[in-house]
Image (tube, rainbow, N blue to C red):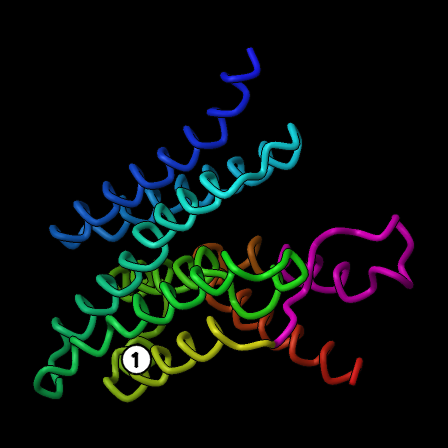
Amino acid sequence: MIKIKKIIPNIFSLLNLFCGCISIIFLQSKNFEYSFISTLFSIMFDFLDGFISRFINNENKFGKELDSLSDMVSFGVVPSIIVFILLKTMKKKIPLIEWSSFFISIFSAYRLAKFNINSSNSRYRGLTTPVNTLFFSSLSIIIKNHYIIPVFIINIIMSPIIIIFLIFCSCYFLVSKIPMISFTFKGIYWKKNKIRYVFLLISTFLLLTLHIVSLPCIIIFYITISIYKNRLKN
């Protein structure tokens, strides 16, 4: 029974990896919707892996390494391929610019390796790879289904300059030391959880009104409010 408990978190890590591989297969046929669904499953399994490990007190080096290797595929390679496809399919493009998308994989690998050797206190420093992947995955659906938002906004987003800027921001925030908001609530009181409550209320409103379009907006808001909180602290 003890042995079974120990392998349960690893099973979720491997399911995360499996969904990441499936996501890559869908991206080969430019099926961003199914790739997005696979990414959501990867995020769910990644969460369950960590949650169950902590719940049964089974955090170990092997599980940590397996989790990082799975994350590298699901949340390191996948966003790079998404951006590669977006840059490759642009009408106005700079030669070979699409290869810059793999900087996301490089910085994701650096972040994951750094996280493995650091203490748990650094868990919420910088943008996590799942959130980074969710940003680019949701962005790809918005761009493909261009009828969701005005065409001129799509044209702005699909500019090589904007995509390169997003790659740069992604790489920077992945390895930055900016403390991101933790959603571990300190009781239920407003004073101690003010920023968390504000973020959740605004995010819920955006989800209900903008649906899929809200996801990149929420992630940008999450980064912004985390920077703001850090500035207030300092």
Asked if the magenta segment contains residue 191, the reply would be yes
Pinpoint residue 4: horizontal percent, then vertical percent: 50, 16
* Residue highlighted by disc 1: 163
**Badge 1, how many Cα within 10 Å: few under 14, some, many 20+?**
some
Q: Please determine whether, in this image, residue 53 is positioned above or below residue 232.
A: above
Task: Name the residue rendered at 13%, 52% in the picture.
Answer: 28
In-front residue for pair 83/147: 83
Quarter of the figure with the C terminus: bottom right
In-front residue for pair 179/1: 1
Task: Name the residue rendered at 45%, 37% in the picture.
Answer: 45
Quadrant of the rendered structure where residue 226 is? bottom right
Pinpoint residue 228: horizontal percent, then vertical percent: 70, 80
Q: Which residue range is magenta in the image?
A: 178-205
Task: Report the number of numbered marks.
Answer: 1
Circle 1: residue type = Ile
Horizontal side of 66 relative to 196 (left or right) equals left
